[in-house]
Every structure is written in structure tokens, then in C-alpha cells.
Image (tube, grey):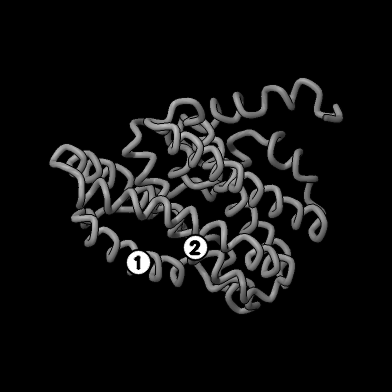
């Protein structure tokens, strides 16, 4: 197996999980209703756990920094997350649409990981895929309820959020430099395969939600290569402030 290819893949996935966890956590105390406040907080905690587990695999098997160092001691240019997860939460409609598009992608990504020849990754995927199913169920329920079963205002806001999110969502599938190696070694089926499954699923849910997927939209790439939006470094500064005061402290 190509260890460089594996590390690149795992950083992409782990960094996405870490940053979306932080964005979700920003709804704590601010959700439109208490149930949603709790839901986003719980999902954020799960995502952070997934990121920690992926960083641990890289540390234990591929000589990368231990999880806290990997998560809290890198600046934006070292991160491999997509632009999609970096974007500010905005209004709740955008966060819900991002939640749905992200978790549906993660569902198919982790499903593929269950058959990975990298056994620690396959074991993790089999462990957490049930959590992701519940995350996706939550998001899908709100997509249909607000898109198709709400009123004209809720439908318009969800459609606007989908229009805004779509090019960034496509950017989640930015190919890495080692796609062929990962596929040939059986580590990962590749971004195109996951994107195809995701697109079919998202199309069905958007139809049920009475929402139209934007057409002729170019994906927003760059995050997987370390080129990020202006939003990521301020997020990292806030997220890592306490840890960086004394990285050696024991909690």
C-alpha cells in the first residue's frame, strides 16, 4: 500500500469531520428550537469523535502526529478540508442543507470504507456508520418537511440555500493526487464512485423535497490542496486558542 496516498485520504476525511463539527457546535444555545439545539450539538460531538479516530489511525500506523497535535496545531495551509465545511453557518436553512449534503456524502464514503483493505479504517467505518445513518435521517427529515411540507417561505429559503451550497458541495469530491493508487490497492473506491452514489441519492431526496438541483455549476475546488477560504484560519484560531496556550498540559 502507498502510505502517502492513505495519509492524504485520511487527512481529507478527518479534516472535513473536524471542521464541520466545529461549525455544528456553533449552534449550541442558538438553535431555533431546543430539540434542534441538542441535535446539532450531539452530531457535532459524533463528528469530532470520527475525526479523532481517523487521526489516531494515522498516528498509530503511519507515524503522523498524535490526534490533538494533528487537530489543533496546524494552520489553514496544512489543512485538507473542503471549502464546503469552512463556510460560516449563516441562517439555519443553509446549515440544514449543508448537513444533508455532507452527511449523505459521508454515508456513501464510510460505506465504501467498510470494504477497505486498510483494516483499521474498515473497522472504524463499520463502527460509526450507524451514527451517520441517524445524522442523515435527521437532515433528510428536515429537507422534506421544509422543502415540500412547509409553506412558500420555507420552500424558497431551502431552495436558496441549496443554490448557494451546491458548488461547494461538489467540491467535497475533489480528486486527490493518489486516486489510482487508492483504487488499485483496494483502500478506497475513489471520489467519482462516491459522487455517483451521492448524486443519485440527493436527486431523489431533492425531488421528494420539491427542490431543484442547480444545473451547469462548476465545483469549488482547492481545499484538498491547502487553498482555503478566508473563513478557515479565523475558525482555527478560535478552535485552537485554549490548546495552544499550553499544548503539553494534561486535562
Most foreground residue, 227 or 20: 20
- Residue 177 is situated, as x and y percent measured from the top left of the image, at 56, 61
Residue located at (76% from left, 52% from top) = 56
Horizontal side of residue 8 vs 193, given as left or right: right
Q: Earlier in the sequence, mark 1 or mark 2?
A: 2
Residues 138 and 62: in front is 138
Q: Is residue 231 left or right of residue 121?
A: left
Question: In this image, 20 relative to 48: left or right?
Answer: left
Circle 2: element type: helix
Q: Please, is residue 164 above or below residue 183 in the view?
A: above
Left-right relation of 170 to 4: left
Q: Is residue 97 above or below residue 8?
A: above
Give me the residue at 66% from left, 48% from top.
Answer: 49
Residue 119 horizontal/vertical position (percent): 73, 71
Q: Which numbered dot is residue 107? A: 2
Q: Are marks 1 and 2 in contact (CB under 8 Å)?
A: yes
Residue 31, above or below 101: above
Q: CA distance from mark 1 to mark 2?
A: 11 Å
- Say which residue appears at 67% left-offset and 23% top-offset: 241
Which quadrant, please, contains the C terminus?
top right
For residue 246, which quarter of the picture? top right
Residue 199 location in percent, x, y? Answer: 34, 65
x and y percent of residue 99 in the render? 42, 47
Residue located at (39% from left, 65% from top) = 198
Amino acid at each position: 500500500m502507498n502510505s502517502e496516498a492513505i495519509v492524504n485520504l485520511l487527512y481529507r476525511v478527518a479534516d472535513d469531520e473536524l471542521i464541520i463539527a466545529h461549525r455544528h457546535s456553533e449552534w449550541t444555545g442558538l438553535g431555533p428550537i431546543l430539540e434542534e439545539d441538542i441535535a446539532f450539538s450531539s452530531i457535532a460531538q459524533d463528528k469530532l469523535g470520527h475525526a479523532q479516530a481517523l487521526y489516531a489511525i494515522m498516528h498509530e500506523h503511519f507515524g503522523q502526529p498524535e490526534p490533538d497535535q494533528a487537530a489543533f496545531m496546524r494552520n489553514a495551509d496544512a489543512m485538507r478540508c473542503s471549502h464546503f465545511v469552512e463556510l460560516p453557518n449563516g441562517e439555519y436553512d443553509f446549515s440544514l442543507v449543508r448537513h444533508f449534503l455532507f452527511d449523505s456524502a459521508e454515508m456513501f464514503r464510510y460505506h465504501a470504507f467498510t470494504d477497505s483493505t486498510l483494516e483499521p479504517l474498515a473497522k472504524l467505518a463499520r463502527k460509526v456508520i450507524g451514527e451517520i445513518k441517524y445524522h442523515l435521517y435527521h437532515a433528510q427529515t428536515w429537507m422534506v418537511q421544509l422543502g415540500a411540507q412547509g409553506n412558500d417561505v420555507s420552500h424558497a429559503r431551502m431552495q436558496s440555500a441549496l443554490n448557494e451550497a451546491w458548488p461547494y458541495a461538489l467540491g467535497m469530491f475533489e480528486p486527490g493526487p493518489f486516486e489510482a493508487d487508492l483504487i488499485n490497492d483496494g483502500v478506497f473506491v475513489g471520489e467519482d464512485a462516491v459522487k455517483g452514489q451521492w448524486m443519485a441519492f440527493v436527486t431523489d431526496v431533492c425531488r421528494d423535497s420539491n427542490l431543484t438541483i442547480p444545473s451547469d455549476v462548476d465545483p469549488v475546488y482547492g481545499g484538498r490542496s491547502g487553498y482555503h477560504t478566508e473563513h478557515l484560519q479565523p475558525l482555527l484560531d478560535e478552535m485552537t486558542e485554549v490548546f495552544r496556550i499550553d499544548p503539553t498540559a494534561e486535562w
